Image: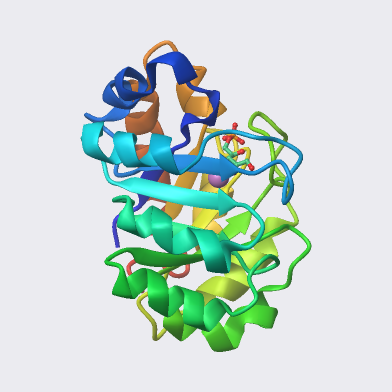
Amino acid sequence: MAVQIAPSILNADFAHLADEVGRIAPAADWVHVDVMDGHFVPNLTLGLPVVERLAQASALPLDCHLMIEDPDRWAPGYAEAGAASVTFHVEAARAPVRLARDLRAAGARAGLALRPATAVDSVRDVLGEVDMLLLMSVEPGFGGQGFLDLVLPKVRRARELVTDLDVRIQVDGGVSSATIERCVDAGADVLVAGSAVYGADDPAEAVRALKAQGQAAADASWWGGAGS
Ligand SMILES: O=C(CO)[C@H](O)[C@H](O)COP(=O)(O)O
Ligand SMILES: [Co+2]
């Protein structure tokens, strides 16, 4: 299974978003768009109108990470706006199964996100309804935070639980050349990297380097190639 890199534009220049996506487009698999509402997390970023225009302007598929309250109400709009993947937090959703089905019906991949303190086993019965499980390795809200090692056993557990399912495991927060191997070795196959990519002189080259490092770790891992 190919390891994928989804650079987060959280630390990109918001005045030139389309250009910033263009800088990673030659190397990235997705562009990770962090939507924050100032309620679910103590930060406010961007919303539906920006995502709608970015989906039209971007050469990459949009991987929207919704850190918002009431995703049951708002998330399907992101799928309709053109996001290829829409991930909502289980801590905020009232009806995660229905919402995942709504997202898929709207043509998007459905993702379920867990804050660092939320146990993977709490969503095991829902995994058959989603395309991706996002495990946060920082408290959501800000880029540039230190990686929380506590995510690693959660990633391993998640990889065990999706053995017979077509579900990607995404790790988000503090992913860099110093942490990516541990994430992939545990079982992650989609890595979000914000500051490690946009803080580099050559963001596309940073993505290529992370991908090569991640793929080598996957090939050597206990689960390597086991996923679909
Ligand atoms: O969801 C997020 C924060 O809530 C971001 O995707 C994440 O923090 C990426 O930035 P960095 O790689 O700098 O940690
Ligand atoms: Co994110």
Task: Report the number of numbered marks.
Answer: 0
Tell me: 130 left or right of 173.
left
If the image is split into quadrants, where does the C terminus sit? Answer: bottom left
**Would you say residue 228 is visible in this rendering?**
no
Residue situated furthest top in the rendering: 201
Can you say whether 40 is above or below 110 in the image? Answer: above
Residue 48 vs 95, above or below: the answer is above
Looking at the image, is 123 positioned above or below residue 190?
A: below
Give the residue displayed 66% in from the left and 74% down from the top.
120
Residue 110 lies in what quarter of the image? bottom left
Name which residue lies at 30% across and 68% down.
106
Percent position (x, y) of residue 54?
Answer: 32, 34
Residue 208 is situated, as x and y percent measured from the top left of the image, at: 32, 31
State the image coordinates of residue 153 (x, y, percent, origin top left): 68, 65
Residue in the image at 39% along x and 69% along y: 103
Along the line of sight, which residue is nearer the eye, 58 or 170? 58
Work out whether residue 47 or residue 1 is closer to the camera in this orientation and state it: 47
Within the displayed image, which quadrant is ligand 2 positioned in? Answer: top right
Residue 190 in the image, given as x and y percentages of width and height:
42, 53
User: 20 and 169: which one is in front?
Assistant: 20
Q: Residue at x 59, y 80 (%)?
A: 95
User: Which of 80 and 5 lies nearest the eye of the viewer?
Assistant: 80
> Which quadrant: the N terminus?
bottom left
| Residue 94 in view of the camera | yes
